[in-house]
Amino acid sequence: AQSVSQHNHHVILSEAASLELGCNYSYGGTVNLFWYVQYPGQHLQLLLKYFSGDPLVKGIKGFEAEFIKSKFSFNLRKPSVQWSDTAEYFCAVRSGNQFYFGTGTSLTVIP
Amino acid sequence: EADIYQTPRYLVIGTGKKITLECSQTMGHDKMYWYQQDPGMELHLIHYSYGVNSTEKGDLSSESTVSRIRTEHFPLTLESARPSHTSQYLCASSTPRGALSYEQYFGPGTRLTVT
């Protein structure tokens, strides 16, 4: 089965710092890639997704992610984080009819 | 905004009780899923359904059962709750029939505590 690795479990940044969260999946074939965000007390929401085409995808709130097929990676980036970005971030891969999630990265942004 | 609902939001129950967690969606999605979410862990798929009368066990069936009698409704039942079932349960749905997009929409979750 597919597996998803998120390398950073807990990240603490100051406001305006740049963010990059790593995500790797275990094997290729046709996959769709997602980043979800879970703000404190809220449900999981889609941040961005990759299905095909341009490997650099832009999502909501200034987030973007780059799909690098040769590295099985889909890293999330934001050039300047805000306090309101404090949340849990999950990378997910759809392979076949199932979705596989990483363990999540907890991001804390200090004002 | 996704229209997927879960009830109850919080539940504290004693060991051995039978419980049903409700999940409904109004988007006409054919695929629905139940996940278990614990802090610091990946979401574990418990059950999924591709449509009415179609259900499959995921990696972690957790001694639970599901049914899919109507497209919009996908309840999860624990016949005999145990403390090991204490967790957050998330319901999700995806894919309108015939669509190419496969993103999932999540409900707010049910926080279950078994004492």
Image: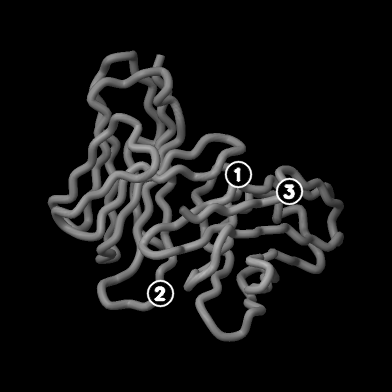
* Whether marks 2 and 1 lie on the same chain: no
Q: Amino acid at mark 3?
A: Asn
Against B77, is A88 above or below?
Answer: below
Report the residue marked by disc 2. Answer: B101
Q: Amino acid at mark 2?
A: Ser
- Nearest the viewer among A89 and A42 is A89
Tell me the mark number nearer the camera, choosing from 1 and 3.
Answer: 3
Report the residue marked by disc 3. Answer: A8
Q: Secondary structure at mark 3?
A: loop
A68 to the left or right of B16 = right
Percent position (x, y) of residue A24? 64, 59
B18 to the left or right of A27 = left
Percent position (x, y) of residue B77? 25, 33
Mark 1 Cα shell of 10 Å, populated few (<14), some (14-19), many (≥20): few
Q: Amino acid at mark 1?
A: Pro
Mark 3 Cα shell of 10 Å, populated few (<14), some (14-19), many (≥20): some
Q: The residue marked by circle 1 belongs to what chain?
A: A
Quadrant where the N terminus of chain B sits is: bottom left
A26 to the left or right of B66 = right
Q: CA distance from mark 2 to mark 1?
A: 27 Å
For marks 1 and 3 on the same chain, the one whose residue lies earlier in the sequence: 3
Image point 80% across, 68% down: which residue?
A: A79
Q: The residue marked by circle 2 belongs to what chain?
A: B
Tell me the mark number nearer the camera, choosing from 2 and 1.
Answer: 2
- Nearest the viewer among B57 and A90 is B57
